[in-house]
Image: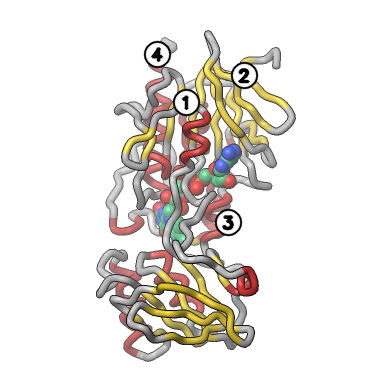
Amino acid sequence: MDHTYQLAIIGAGPAGIATAIESYVLGMRDIILLEKDENHNATIRKFYKDNKRVDKDWKGQKVELDGTIYFMDGTKESTLDFFDQLLDHESLELRTHTEVQKIVKRENDFEVFIAGGSLLAKNVVVTIGRMGKPNKPDYKIPPSIKNQVHFTLDGCGSGEKIMVIGGGDSAIEYAVDLCDRNEVSICYRRGTFRRANPTNQADIERALANGSVRALLNTEITEIESESGKVKVLFSDGTSELFDRLVYAIGGTTPSGFLSGSGIREEEGKPVHDENYQTNISGLFVAGDITQESGGSIALGLNHGFAIANYIMNLSK
Ligand SMILES: Cc1cc2nc3c(=O)[nH]c(=O)nc-3n(C[C@H](O)[C@H](O)[C@H](O)COP(=O)(O)OP(=O)(O)OC[C@H]3O[C@@H](n4cnc5c(N)ncnc54)[C@H](O)[C@@H]3O)c2cc1C
């Protein structure tokens, strides 16, 4: 508790790592990155399928990179390697297995509360993303089929009848990945996959055309039940169908409890911040996916980190 870090960053995803690296490059020392998982980039590790193509211009959003981190299209594995190298190169202090509970503003610094203690920092950047709490359906998931209902591809094998729910890039990538070894349907409440990026649109069109994925478009699910060890899906048109497994890919939610517990104001589902990503509390910033209602990207997170690093370093001159 005696030591006061110059900068504490909560969450070691792309935005958190970028904030740390860019601050370091600008000359700041004494930076700590706090990550609740066993390693950095838990969202990429858990939600990206193996060998997933990683697009710099995710969801078709063209982003010019402002900072010093040269991020390019790649795969899940090359992206994780890239972040490993960045962290190793600058010898940044990454403390894993450290979940931050809340941040409290004191007179001249912040107290950052973690299990069993706290640490002090002059500035704090919150980059905890939105995938800590993936969106869940508003109908109940009966406990008896919980193990057959997923939010990532973990637990999906082969030779099964699987339905993916969602129509964005993640849902399409999941469906296309699963379809070479499973019987796959994709259920989407809209009529087209036009929200996805061009590559994913082409991939799903191809899979639909050759019959390896079946699309249930303009289709809403009203309920799911357990029947004979399977998941029975009831649709709004009154029909139903049995599946071995469901995979929901319907985005994530703003961690409102964390934000309000730290005094960060929220409006319209997003934390309030100014053009430097500073919240209503001076010295407390937000970056990355939590600043977006939906649809952040790695490149956007990198730019947020660069902007915050510049702002803090300019203030200290
Ligand atoms: C399936 C899928 C595919 C995607 N594909 C692409 C793509 O191809 N290209 C692209 O640019 N973007 C893609 N995205 C989006 C991209 O992953 C996000 O925009 C990006 O990861 C956001 O970075 P972030 O740093 O804001 O948050 P995150 O990456 O979510 O990182 C947040 C980190 O904070 C940690 N954390 C959370 N709470 C706490 C806490 N209380 N204390 C400490 N640590 C905490 C988490 O464990 C996590 O490591 C995809 C997203 C998904 C779900």
Q: Which residue is mark 1?
A: 263
- Asked whether the residues under the numbered discs 1 and 3 touch, taking CB atoms below 8 Å apart as contact, a structural biologist would say no
Q: Marks 3 and 2, Cα distance to the nearest angstrom?
A: 29 Å
Residue 44 pos. (x, y %): 53, 55
Would residue 288 be found to the left or right of residue 49 on screen? left
Q: Which residue is mark 3?
A: 45
Disc nearer the start of the sequence (4/1): 1
Disc nearer the start of the sequence (3/2): 3
* Residue 90 visible, this orientation: yes
Look at discs 1 and 2 and give the one toward the viewer.
1
Numbered disc 3: secondary structure: helix
Q: Amino acid at mark 3?
A: Arg
Numbered disc 2: secondary structure: strand
Residue 14 pos. (x, y %): 48, 44
Would residue 21 be found to the left or right of residue 214 on screen? right
Q: Is mark 3 within 8 Å of ligand 1?
A: no
Q: Marks 4 and 3, Cα distance to the nearest angstrom?
A: 35 Å
Q: Amino acid at mark 1?
A: Gly
Q: Which residue is mark 4?
A: 315
